[in-house]
Amino acid sequence: MSVINLSSYKKLYLQTAKEYCDSLLKNCHKILQNLKDKDALENIYIRAHSLKSQSQVMGYSKIEELSGMIEKTAKKFLDEKKSVPEDLMQAIQKSAEEIKIALRNIEGEK
């Protein structure tokens, strides 16, 4: 199996990943203001799924893992048609903040 050099895609990855992360944080804030905001939860699910997939391709396993957990949690509550408890939403927000830090670290790599 041949190895593919993805370094030329790093800039594009960071651009889209930051947008997804900002959207995650924005929608977390919306849900913390209104725990029944299903549109915000749907947005979290979609952004987390996309971020997980792109991070997997690029080999950023920490971001893949965090966004995957966010995705699975959002999907569970969407499928069950339930509101996310506030403490769990705060944990999701903390995970999104960790993703943001990880993205800054990747951006700082040479």
Image (cartoon, rainbow, N blue to C red):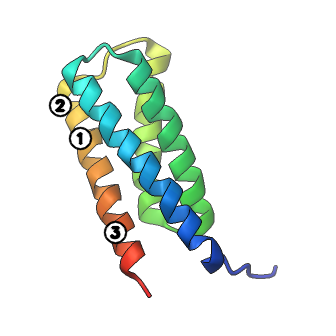
- Observer-side mark, 1 or 3, equals 3
Q: Residue at x 36, y 46 (%)?
A: 22
| Rendered view: 78 above or below 13 | above
Q: Is residue 88 left or right of residue 68?
A: left
Q: Can the viewer see residue 106 in this picture?
A: yes
Image quadrant in which the C terminus is located: bottom left
Q: CA distance from mark 1 to mark 2?
A: 6 Å
Q: Tell me the distance, in whole angstroms, between the alpha carbons under discs 3 and 2.
A: 26 Å
Q: Is residue 59 visible?
A: no
Residue 26 x/y as whole percent: 31, 36
Is residue 57 found left or right of 27 in the rendered image? right
Say which element carries label 2. helix
Q: What is the three-letter code of the residue carrying label 3?
A: Arg
Which structural element holds mark 3? helix
Q: Disc 1 on helix, strand or loop?
A: helix
Rendered view: 83 above or below 92: above
Q: Amino acid at mark 1?
A: Ala
Q: Is residue 96 above or below residue 72?
A: below
- Quarter that holds the N terminus: bottom right
Q: Which residue is mark 3?
A: 104
Task: Give the Cα separation between the discs numbered 1 and 3.
Answer: 20 Å
Q: Dot 1 surroundings within 10 Å: few (below 14), some, or many (20 or more)?
A: few
Marks 2 and 1: in contact by CB < 8 Å? yes
Q: Which mark is residue 21?
A: none
Kind of residue indicated by mark 2? Asp
Q: Residue at x 23, y 23 (%)?
A: 85
Quadrant location of residue 25?
top left
Residue at horizontal 49 percent and vertical 67 percent from the top: 60
Depth check, front residue: 107 or 68? 107
Which mark, by number, is residue 91?
1
Residue 97, image x and y in percent?
Answer: 27, 52
Q: How many marks?
A: 3
